[in-house]
Amino acid sequence: MPLPDGADSEAHGEDRLLSYHFSMPCLRWPRAILLLLAVTAGQACAVPVFAYALRQWEPAPHTMQTTRGAAWIETTNRTLMDQKAWVMATDADAAGSGVFWPGGGTLWHSGEIDAGQLEGLINSPVRRELVRRLVAGDAAVWLFVPGGDAAADAAALERLSKRLRTLEGMIELPPPSEPGNALPPLRFSILECPATDPAEWATLAQLRALAKQADGSLIAPVFGRGRVLTSQATSEWTDELIDSVTFFLTGPCSCQVKEMNPGTDLLVCADWMTQFDTAQTAAQVVPPAPTAPPPVERVVIGAAPPAEPVPPPSTRLSPLLWTMLGLGVLLAGALAIALATRKPPP
């Protein structure tokens, strides 16, 4: 995993993250034009944004600044690299201790990270499942943070799910540009991130920092190798905004430079290339055709054992019968001779 060296100039400015759907031209177009894009996108030759990002856009690591000293930093960095965590510990500067977005521009967590927090910083159940789904072929995983109102949360989930199912049936992905590069069927999924789970403190901190929202429900679409396109309050996610984000992710990747596209890399633990290659290899393996199982003899517990089969009667004659038959023939012959030589009475 490459480590930041100060040359990473990834721009993810706060204003752009909060208002990208106003600044991105594709998100300002009327819905009629967006629907037209959905129809024509399937005829484009370029790889869709979500697929190109998964194959080509390597995540940029976050920076954890600390005052714990060089020995702790060296040991911690060795652990982070072993676990494939996209973060690096460095000495704290004037900005103080905390965790910064890639590029070192903005702080999303303030304060030191102790040993008990390190695992939760780099990993969590939601982020592991997020990585699994993206590698498995989901075009985007929509993270949902509930706000605490059960009825409102259920309604928001239903509205989002219904719209995504409609878009899955509407959008046609382009044919593969090369043999073996066929895309899986378009699929979106929704993954809930519990708002009160201590294991998800770092996931929630990142999503809330992007949304500049300390509480309440959030929705954040994630694509590629853990890139959050945006994090917004649930109330802001109209059908038009959902459509705009979806058409951007499934449209042709006109700009291949990651930093010139909207989004921010989420802090996760993942060896993306290895997982991606493993998934591709597994998808190409054709399992052998199942063989028919041998017939199973039915056994009734407690039933009487089957009777011994009775052999059919033999058609061969026994020696006694042959003897009696021979005697009969001799007697018949003797009788015939006697009758033939008998003299008639005078």
Image (cartoon, rainbow, N blue to C red):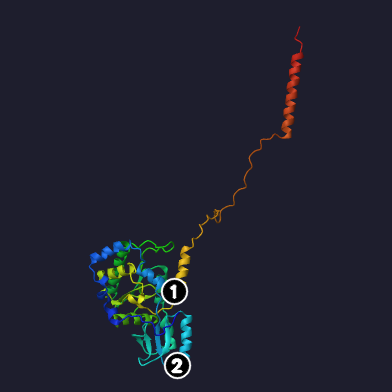
Q: Is residue 182 above or below residue 60?
A: above
Q: Is residue 333 above or below residue 88?
A: above
Q: Which comes sooner in the sequence, label 1 or label 2? A: 2
SS assignment at label 1: helix
The amino acid sitting under disc 1 is Trp
Frontmost residue, 206 versus 258: 258
Residue at figure coordinates x 28%, y 72% from the top left = 156
How far apart, in angstroms, are the residues tagged by discs 1 and 2? 31 Å
Residue at figure coordinates x 71%, y 35% from the top left = 318
Frontmost residue, 314 versus 141: 141
Quarter-of-image position of residue 147: bottom left
Direction from residue 60 to residue 313 in the image, left or right: right
The amino acid sitting under disc 2 is Gly
Residue 98 x %, y %: 37, 88
Give the class, few, some or many, for how many residues have Cα within 10 Å of label 2's Cα (few <14, many ≥20).
few
Q: Which quadrant holds the N terminus?
A: bottom left
Residue 272 is tagged as 1
Quarter-of-image position of residue 342: top right
**Residue 212 visible, this orientation:** no
**Residue 114 visible, this orientation:** yes
Quarter-of-image position of residue 137: bottom left
Frontmost residue, 110 versus 274: 274
SS assignment at label 2: loop
Frontmost residue, 105 versus 78: 105
Question: Residue extending furthest top?
Answer: 346
Residue 69 is tagged as 2
Residue 44 x %, y %: 33, 63
Residue 295 x %, y %: 54, 53
Residue 325 x %, y %: 72, 28
Give the class, few, some or many, for how many residues have Cα within 10 Å of label 1's Cα (few <14, many ≥20).
many
